């Protein structure tokens, strides 16, 4: 919140913090105490993030125990009843290695061998490659993927907690973490996918924006756009926060505005690599045709998914169920984004950067539904909804309602463990 007291000099993004007051007068012979501003600031920084980590750690550990147990018991779905044949323990964690994880493994081990694989941006496999080199384990890319994803996942929740604490309150920070954890596709945050790394970098960029640290925000934005193309949309909250913290006065723009160029530079660097490697500056965009992604209106996928349900062989058919599992989360997150703009839970002007980012990313994700047969136009959309972290912050505000706070976690968690079991047993959960 922005301060209203002109005597307090603060960062407008995070509320009152330090007061600019004149030094007190001392009587003759009095010896003033030595100022302790710097040590106090360092202590504050350390305490703040330590507390955020301690608040995050219990939920992080419990959820990993639950995911680990689910990985073990999911074996029962792949074995016939009363069989005497056992399964090696290492298969429990290898069961996480499905679908896009295979592409990241290939990129981490041998690089981009085909132009169509440039659809997967490079920073996540680069981190996996770095882990393999540091641990001298070139034959264990899966282990590296899991380590990178889970470390990024922990940092993600620490930053989310601290961001919501400073911009809202501690109660909403806890609920935002819980609601994100139990979202039906949250297991992708610990799976060997780049979701957790991208959201982590986006949150770090957002946190620095709210504090007016433009160069740090630009650096985190650079790595975010080098992880997923949607990182480009961090430009919108960057521009809004930069102008808002200067009272929308263009005369107050300084040289540090140049740091916003770092955000699209991530995509630019990858484009140059694509040109060097395959002679195509936009190879990563053209590669989307391999998965039948084509440009349409943002309503096309939603309407197509509803039509696919209607023409299916019944509500319990594969086609109907799969479309429902993509459609319902997409509509739910869309509702939350709308409520962040209008209605009793709308965000104040000082927090419109959240709305801008969530709205722009949501529309962008809806512009490229799956073509081909047209039977599953919103494929993977439920996973992409994880990137819209402002929706979970708004959900935390709605969570003050006891009914919502009770039933959302129950319903979401039940769907989460159903989808997780499907994923672990090799079913089509992308």
Image (cartoon, rainbow, N blue to C red):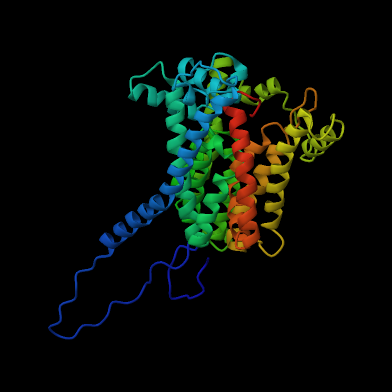
In this picture, is 45 found above or below 16? above
Residue 407 horizontal side relative to residue 72, left or right: right
For the point 43% across and 29% down, which residue is it? 127
Q: Nearer the viewer, residue 23 or 428?
A: 428
- Estimate the x, y position of residue 286 in percent, counting from the top left: 67, 23
The quadrant of the picture occupied by the C terminus is top right
- Estimate the x, y position of residue 328 in percent, counting from the top left: 73, 42
For the point 44% across and 22% down, which residue is it? 90
- Estimate the x, y position of residue 366 in percent, counting from the top left: 72, 38
Q: Nearer the viewer, residue 384 or 107?
A: 384
Q: Which image quarter: residue 285? A: top right
Q: Nearer the viewer, residue 422 or 352?
A: 422
In this picture, is 430 found above or below 26? above
- Estimate the x, y position of residue 117 in percent, counting from the top left: 59, 19
Residue 17 horizontal side relative to residue 286, left or right: left
Query: Total label count?
Result: 0
The reply to whether residue 6 is visible in this rendering is: yes
Q: Which image quarter: residue 130? A: top left
């Amino acid at each position: 919140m922005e301060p209203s007291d002109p005597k307090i000099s603060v960062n407008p993004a995070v509320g009152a913090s330090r007061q600019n007051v004149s030094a007190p007068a001392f009587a003759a012979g009095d010896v003033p105490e030595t100022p302790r501003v710097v040590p106090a600031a360092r202590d504050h920084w350390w305490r703040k993030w330590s507390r955020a980590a301690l608040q995050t750690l219990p939920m992080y550990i419990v959820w990993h125990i639950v995911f680990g147990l689910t990985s073990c018991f999911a074996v029962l779905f792949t074995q016939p009843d009363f069989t005497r044949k056992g399964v090696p323990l290492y298969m429990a964690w290898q069961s996480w290695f499905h679908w896009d994880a295979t592409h990241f493994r290939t990129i981490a081990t041998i690089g981009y061998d085909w132009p169509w694989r440039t659809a997967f941006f490079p920073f996540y496999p680069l981190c996996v490659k770095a882990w393999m080199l540091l641990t001298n384990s070139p034959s264990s890319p899966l282990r590296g993927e899991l380590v990178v994803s889970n470390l990024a996942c922990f940092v993600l929740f620490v930053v989310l907690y601290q961001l919501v604490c400073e911009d809202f309150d501690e109660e909403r920070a806890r609920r935002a973490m819980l609601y994100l954890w139990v979202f039906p596709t949250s297991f992708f945050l610990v799976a060997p996918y780049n979701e957790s790394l991208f959201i982590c970098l986006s949150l770090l960029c957002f946190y620095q924006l709210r504090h007016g640290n433009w160069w740090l925000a630009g650096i985190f934005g650079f790595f975010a756009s080098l992880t997923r193309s949607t990182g480009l949309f961090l430009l919108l909250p960057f521009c809004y926060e930069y102008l808002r913290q200067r009272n929308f006065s263009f005369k107050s723009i300084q040289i540090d505005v140049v740091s916003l160029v770092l955000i699209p530079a991530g995509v630019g660097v990858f484009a140059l690599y694509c040109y060097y490697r395959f002679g195509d500056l936009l190879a990563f965009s053209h590669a989307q045709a391999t998965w039948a992604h084509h440009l349409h209106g943002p309503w096309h996928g939603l309407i197509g998914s509803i039509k696919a349900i209607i023409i299916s062989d019944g509500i319990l058919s594969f086609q109907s169920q799969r479309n429902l599992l993509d459609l319902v989360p997409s509509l739910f997150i869309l509702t939350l984004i709308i409520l962040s703009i209008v209605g009793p839970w709308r965000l104040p002007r000082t927090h419109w950067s959240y709305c801008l980012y969530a709205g722009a990313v949501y529309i962008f994700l809806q512009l490229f539904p799956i073509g081909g047969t047209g039977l599953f136009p919103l494929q993977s959309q439920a996973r992409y909804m994880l990137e819209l972290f402002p929706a979970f912050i708004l959900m935390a505000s709605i969570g003050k309602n006891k009914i919502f706070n009770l039933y959302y976690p129950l319903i979401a968690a039940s769907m989460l463990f159903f989808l997780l079991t499907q994923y672990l047993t090799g079913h089509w959960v992308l």
